[in-house]
């Protein structure tokens, strides 16, 4: 089977489309008069109704999905709503769609009127066929179901004959829940009522009237229904005979009187049923264990004969009196018994108990458990050496024998005594059965201690038990053979858990033993030993871990292990070095034993261990509109109006002509301004003479200035004071607009200017909208060519032509060529200029879409200044969040943080070491000798400053430290302290 495709967890996407859909649904349900839940819950998840609606509609709608078997389960899986109970999840999802979206689907997707709520939302989601459901066929089907049931309110569980399995399966939705089981409650009335019922039947058979009336009446009154009033008299006449009873109380039928229709009789109800207390009876089927025990007891009694007096006494006592000790005490007593079979039983169970119940199994609750396990584990000495280790708890003893251990203060000479032991010739591959069994029991005893000290309370308890330290030293000094590897690893695990509560000096046997493990080649041994040493005195309230007396070979090994690609080992080494370098005397030993320059370079390398490097682009300034200096200087110069634009504006009336002229020749610019007189003069020069010729009046200046604020709402007339050589003067300006660099048409198209400049003449100031018109303008106005009167075509004559367009140098001198050939050259100029203006317009429109502007602002920038960005490199290393403040920013963690802390310890303490003082004296002596030699030869060379270890160690890596400081945000705070210590 292939791997299961992972489905994203369902969640609500609150998009504008979702909000609009929910509002439509809310309005639809309000109009329909049904309850609406916008975020129905399915377990602990809220259902996205928009996703559900789209998904169901894509698969054919409610009716289509309901017709297919197990299709609603697939819908749950596809939407990421499947939890643990697939049938329940599918039914819940179907119910949500049925009540919230089914009617909406019929209305919107099928364009039909949905069924009324009485037969849709107010009913269960059983089956499908919503599109064909009507009030008539739905009620008829419900009524038919009730008639077939044979009882009021009790549906029939039998399948109707006309239904077939195929038709039932085709219309089924989800499986119907089975009918709940009802516990039978027998009647508590007397047995005379049963005879009353039989009497009625027999009496009815002898009476013609009752023969027909009684069965019909009896069938119409089921159990618990109302009966005639004479039934109550039956309770008072219990002493009468059955014959007289039948004669007196036989049902007379409807013709007997009007008591049947008496309201008192009809309203009478029987008293409530009383529940009879039941007693559980043990049977071979309900309690087979009890009967099996009875059978075994009978068989044993037959075999063993008469019971003993002890058995008689035990059978006479209540249960629970002689149960014996529990399993915990049983294992403890078995361990202390000295019987090998009992010890094997106890240790086997203690291993399981310590592993399964290690969180509650405590040494303090079972007196003698720690002593028993330790004493049994000390038996390992007799397997490999000629010694039997015992614990002496006598405080009066001053000298101990070879195999005696001080149980009160611990044996400080345990290592010397182990070294003097005579080993036994033990083979690593072949051992006797007794040896193997004994070693297995010792391993189980040590493993039990190891499992139990994982609980902090047990670890603290065992740290106060001195013989355990001697046991660890003995176990860790066993011969280097494979059969004791598990014992040694268990001993190291025990040491790792108890050392946080111990204060170990440099000459402590356990401390020396743990340091000796760092010379091993076993990675697991090295890791556990490093952790155990690093945790010494961690939980002690006053003492700290000095870590003195570490051999130089161990320090060199630590340097080598930092080069390995092993994060776990590297982390353990850095923890050890962090505590080691916190002591000044230890740093002295490290300077003498290793090459500190290499260590510092490795630590700086580890600052970026596991870092993810990347670049981030930061926008310094967004893209903006920029007007160059030439434009700013010419802000008061308004271009001449093109002829075609003048004709269009003359056809307009005021103030529309004024509005369009301002839009065509000015644009918004919050940083610019124009003088009022310049704007008015430009408008006056453009329209005064043409309007006079047509006999029309001009708009006055005051109204014209007010119209500027109407066109550009950000613009306004102001009076500014300026200091000039002639004194302070007032300037009447309009702030917020500037003259366009090129005019535009009322539709927003840009005009471009003719750049033709004939020798000795001024630059042409004609503007045109298209390259074709500009081409005709040059041909007729500058080359003085005229079309033929007949066909309106230009004659392709041959002549001398020169191009004066802008800075063109191709035909700077008169050149002999055809007119059409020369005009093809001119066409390249006009089309290029048209494209350039069009490109300016497109760029300005793009910037305008992303630039905040007022409602009527229509900027047409000439220069688009792109956004200024810078790229920053960054690196992300391991981080962790504070559990006490999860909302705080993440903090540095892992190997990079440990490396940085070690560098800080070195920078802080290296100046306090004896090696630093010796180096300073040596440098000063050398400098003094150099100075005296220079004076002897008359040199004027100045002496250099004394270079200490801080300079030697950190100067080569300062560049890398600054690089990490700028790129690693997590380490920046701690690195700033390091750089301050270095004086950088």
Image (tube, rainbow, N blue to C red):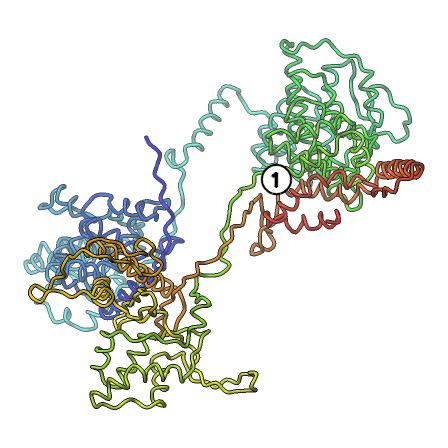
Q: Residue at x 34, y 59 (%)?
A: 40
Please give left or right for residue 58 compared with residue 964 in the image: left
Which is nearer the eye, 326 or 379? Answer: 379
Which is nearer the eye, 246 or 444? Answer: 444
- The percent position of residue 926, horizontal first and vertical second, equals 88, 35
Please give left or right for residue 895 compared with residue 557 in the image: left
Tag 1: Cα neighbours inside 10 Å, few (<14), some, or many (≥20)? Answer: some
In the figure, 921 relative to 806: above or below? above
- The percent position of residue 301, horizontal first and vertical second, equals 50, 23
* Residue 509 falls in image quadrant: top right
- Viewport quadrant of the N terminus: top left
Please give left or right for residue 593 compared with residue 767 in the image: right
> Is residue 218 visible to the viewer in this orientation of the structure?
no
Please give left or right for residue 957 compared with residue 619 in the image: right
In the figure, 956 relative to 637: above or below? above
Q: Residue at x 33, y 80 (%)?
A: 711
- The percent position of residue 71, horizontal first and vertical second, equals 24, 45
Which is nearer the eye, 923 or 250? Answer: 923
**Disc 1 target residue:** 359
Q: Residue at x 55, y 83 (%)?
A: 724
Q: Residue at x 44, y 79 (%)?
A: 735
* Residue 809 falls in image quadrant: bottom left
- The percent position of residue 457, horizontal first and vertical second, equals 69, 41
> Is residue 141 visible to the viewer in this orientation of the structure?
yes
In the figure, 151 relative to 375: above or below? below
């Amino acid at each position: 089977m292939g791997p299961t495709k992972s489905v994203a967890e369902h969640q609500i996407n609150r998009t504008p489309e979702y909000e609009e859909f929910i509002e439509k649904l809310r309005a639809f349900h309000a109009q329909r008069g049904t309850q609406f839940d916008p975020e129905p819950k399915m377990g602990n998840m809220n259902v996205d109704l928009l996703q559900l609606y789209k998904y169901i509609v894509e698969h054919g709608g409610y009716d289509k999905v309901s017709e297919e078997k197990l299709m609603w389960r697939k819908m749950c899986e596809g939407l990421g709503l499947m939890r643990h109970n697939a049938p329940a999840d599918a039914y819940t999802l179907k119910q949500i769609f049925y009540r919230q979206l089914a009617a909406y689907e019929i209305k919107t997707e099928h364009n039909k009127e949905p069924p009324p709520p009485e037969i849709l939302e107010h009913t269960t989601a059983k089956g499908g066929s919503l599109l064909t459901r009507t009030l008539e066929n739905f009620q008829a089907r419900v009524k038919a179901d009730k008639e077939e049931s044979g009882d009021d309110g009790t549906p029939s569980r039998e399948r109707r004959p006309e239904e077939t399995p195929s038709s039932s399966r085709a219309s089924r939705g989800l499986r119907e829940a089975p009918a709940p089981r009802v516990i039978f409650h027998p009647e508590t009335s007397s047995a005379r009522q049963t005879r009353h019922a039989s009497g009625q039947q027999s009496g009815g058979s002898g009476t013609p009237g009752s023969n027909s009336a009684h069965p019909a009446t009896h069938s119409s009154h089921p159990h618990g229904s109302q009966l005639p009033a004479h039934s109550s008299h039956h309770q008072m006449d219990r002493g009468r005979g059955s014959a007289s009873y039948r004669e007196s109380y036989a049902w007379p039928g409807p013709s007997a009187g009007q008591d049947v229709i008496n309201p008192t009789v009809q309203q009478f109800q029987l008293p409530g049923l009383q529940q009879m207390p039941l007693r559980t009876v043990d049977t071979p089927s309900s309690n087979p264990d009890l009967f099996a025990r009875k059978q075994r007891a009978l068989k044993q009694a037959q075999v063993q004969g008469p019971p003993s007096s002890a058995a008689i006494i035990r059978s006479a006592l209540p249960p629970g009196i002689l149960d014996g000790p529990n399993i915990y005490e049983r294992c403890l007593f078995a361990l202390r018994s000295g019987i090998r079979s009992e010890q094997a039983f106890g240790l086997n169970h203690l291993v399981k108990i310590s592993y399964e119940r290690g969180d509650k199994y405590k040494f303090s609750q079972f007196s003698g458990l720690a002593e028993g396990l330790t004493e049994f584990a000390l038996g390992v000495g007799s397997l490999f050496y000629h010694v039997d280790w015992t614990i002496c708890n006598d405080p009066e003893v001053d000298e101990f024998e070879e195999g005696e251990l001080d149980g009160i203060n611990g044996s400080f000479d345990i290592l010397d005594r182990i070294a003097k032991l005579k080993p036994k010739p033990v083979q690593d591959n072949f051992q006797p059965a007794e040896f193997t069994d004994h070693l297995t029991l010792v391993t189980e005893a040590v493993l039990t201690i190891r499992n139990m000290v994982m609980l902090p309370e047990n670890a603290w308890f065992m740290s106060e038990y001195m013989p355990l330290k001697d046991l660890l030293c003995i176990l860790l000094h066993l011969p280097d053979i494979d059969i004791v590897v598990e014992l040694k690893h268990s001993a190291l695990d025990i040491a790792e858990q108890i050392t946080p509560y111990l204060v170990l000096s440099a000459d402590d046997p356990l401390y020396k033993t743990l340091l000796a493990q760092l010379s091993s080649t076993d990675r697991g041994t090295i890791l556990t030993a490093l952790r155990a040493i690093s945790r010494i005195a961690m939980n002690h309230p006053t003492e700290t871990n000095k870590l003195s007396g570490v051999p130089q070979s161990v320090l060199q090994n630590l340097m080598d292990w930092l080069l390995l690609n092993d994060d776990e080992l590297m982390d353990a080494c850095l923890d050890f070095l962090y505590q080691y370098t916190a002591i000044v005397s230890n740093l002295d030993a490290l300077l003498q034993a290793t090459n500190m320059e290499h260590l510092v370079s490795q630590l700086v390398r580890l600052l970026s261990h596991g870092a993810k490097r990347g670049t981030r682009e930061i926008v310094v300034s967004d893209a903006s509109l920029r007007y160059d200096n030439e434009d700013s200087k010419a802000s008061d110069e308004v271009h001449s109006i093109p002829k075609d634009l003048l004709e269009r504006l003359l056809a307009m009336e005021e103030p529309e002509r004024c509005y369009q002229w301002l839009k065509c020749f000015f644009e918004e610019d919050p940083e610019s301004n124009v003088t009022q007189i310049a704007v008015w003069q430009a408008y006056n020069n453009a329209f005064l003479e043409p309007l006079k010729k047509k006999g029309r009046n001009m708009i006055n200046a005051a109204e014209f200035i007010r119209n500027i604020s109407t066109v550009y709402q950000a613009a306004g007339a102001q009076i500014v004071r300026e200091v000039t050589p002639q004194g302070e003067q007032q300037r009447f300006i309009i702030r917020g607009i500037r003259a366009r660099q090129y005019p535009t048409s009322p539709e927003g198209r840009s005009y471009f200017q003719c750049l033709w400049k004939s020798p000795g003449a001024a630059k042409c100031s004609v503007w045109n909208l298209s390259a074709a018109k500009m081409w005709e303008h040059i041909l007729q106005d500058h080359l003085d060519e005229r079309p033929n009167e007949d066909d309106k075509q230009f004659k392709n004559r041959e002549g001398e032509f020169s191009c004066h367009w802008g800075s063109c140098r191709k035909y700077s001198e008169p050149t002999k060529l055809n007119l059409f050939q020369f005009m093809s050259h001119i066409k390249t100029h006009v089309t290029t200029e048209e494209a350039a203006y069009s490109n300016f317009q497109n760029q300005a429109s793009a910037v305008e879409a992303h630039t905040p502007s007022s409602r009527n602002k229509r900027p047409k920038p000439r220069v688009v200044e792109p956004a200024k960005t810078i790229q920053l490199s960054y690196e992300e290393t391991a981080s962790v969040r504070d559990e006490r403040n999860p909302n705080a920013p993440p903090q540095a963690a892992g190997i990079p943080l440990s490396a940085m802390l070690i560098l800080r310890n070195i920078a802080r303490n290296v100046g306090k070491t004896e090696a630093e003082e010796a180096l300073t004296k040596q440098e000063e002596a050398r400098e003094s000798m150099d100075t005296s030699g220079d004076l002897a030869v008359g040199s004027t060379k100045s002496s250099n400053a004394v270079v200490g270890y801080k300079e030697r160690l950190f100067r080569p890596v300062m560049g890398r430290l600054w690089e990490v400081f700028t790129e690693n945000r997590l380490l920046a705070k701690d690195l700033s302290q390091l750089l301050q210590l270095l004086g950088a």
